[in-house]
Amino acid sequence: MLNNTEHIDVLIALVLSGEANPEQVREVELWRQASEENRVYFEEMKQVFDSVQATDTNDYQVDKAWEKVKLSLNDSQVVKLKSKHFYESTWFRIAAVILVVVGVSWMLFLNQSVNMLAVISSDKVMHDTMPDGSIITLNKHSVIQYADDFGKKNRRVVLKGEAYFNVVHDEKIPFVVETNGVFIKDIGTAFNVSTNIDSSEVTVIVEEGEVYFYRSTGEGIYLKKGESAVYNRGNGSITKFDKLPMNATAYRDGILNFNNTPMSEVASAISKLYGVNVIADEKIANCKLTVRFENESLETVLSIISETLGLEVKHQDTTIVFSGNACN
């Protein structure tokens, strides 16, 4: 279910694209007039929308849109943003407008005196090559921001969401990821960084090499291949683990592997991979599942699990619920 902020973003996208009905137009207008902050936010959304329209994206297929948009960046279109609220917004607050036009998104905006480029994924995993040759795999609904002079003085990126980084190592100019007030510094590495839904935790997984995972004070820990760590924003702690969490990077290969896994954890993994809300009823939350899925549809996964454990799958509004009295 969308929260109030996401709800108004959807309505703004509909209004700007001309798809809104009279009731939706009226709701947006009342919201816009309610405060100066709302008015500024709406105008900035409109600026982004208009800048994308200027690329003439309606004339070609969505799967070709990203390549054409990247070429258009040579024109250095800049959207000047004054609202801090907009600048800190999530992928949805940016992409809700742009997705209506192209399905994949881009935005070049001005932050004080530095030109920043943002790569934004929509409902598909994206692959992008940074100016230094480093390769990024961006999970759905995620954002990467970096300066247009990336690689000259620093290689710093800001992440919202989840991404996998295969970094070209450079000791003189280290690659640094910032997210939710913590930093991950490359020491010759392939690693994954993710934040949970409410941004209360940051998880780092190292598949190759080594990273330094640290707070703004500089205090942190080193992680090597096969290790992971979780930062708790509430108490500021960083907890290290000697193994990688199961299915943590399923978004990259589409593989879900469960080995005597409780249904509560199974539901969570399915939710993350397919972008839906799946829960396990309390009565069967501890039922154990052992199965492997490879690039299967959501419907197939739900069907096989229900048949394997003798469970019922219910659709309640926007939530999918596994329920039953016992496990097979």
Image (cartoon, helix red, strand yellow):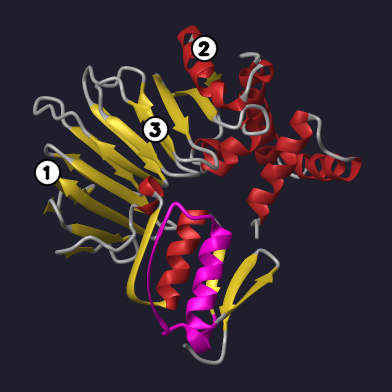
Q: Nearer the viewer, residue 22 or 167?
A: 167
Tag 2 near tag 1, CB within 8 Å: no
| Residue that numbered label 1 is attached to | 209
Q: Residues within 10 Å of mark 3 (few under 14, many from 20)?
A: some
- The three-letter amino acid code for the residue at tag 3 is His
Task: Give x and y (percent) for residue 17.
Answer: 75, 29
Task: Give x and y (percent) for residue 92.
Answer: 57, 43
| Residue that numbered label 2 is attached to | 72
Q: Which residues are magenta?
A: 281-310
Q: What's the CA distance linking mark 3 and mark 1?
A: 21 Å
Q: What residue is drawn where x is 58% and y is 36%?
A: 95
Query: Does the magenta run of residues contain 22?
Result: no
Q: What residue is drawn where x is 68% and y is 71%?
A: 316
Q: What residue is drawn where x is 27% and y is 63%?
A: 245
- The three-letter amino acid code for the residue at tag 2 is Ser
Q: Residues within 10 Å of mark 2 (few under 14, many from 20)?
A: some
Q: What's the CA distance linking mark 3 and mark 2?
A: 18 Å
Q: What's the CA distance linking mark 2 and mark 1?
A: 36 Å
Q: Residues within 10 Å of mark 1 (few under 14, many from 20)?
A: some
* Left or right of residue 207: residue 322: right
For the question of whether residue 78 can be seen, the reply is no
Tag 3 near tag 1, CB within 8 Å: no
> Could you tell me which secondary element the residue under label 1 belongs to?
loop
Determine the residue located farthest toward the left in the rendered image: 171
Q: Nearer the viewer, residue 38 or 79?
A: 79
Q: Is residue 224 above or below residue 176?
A: below
| Residue that numbered label 3 is attached to | 127
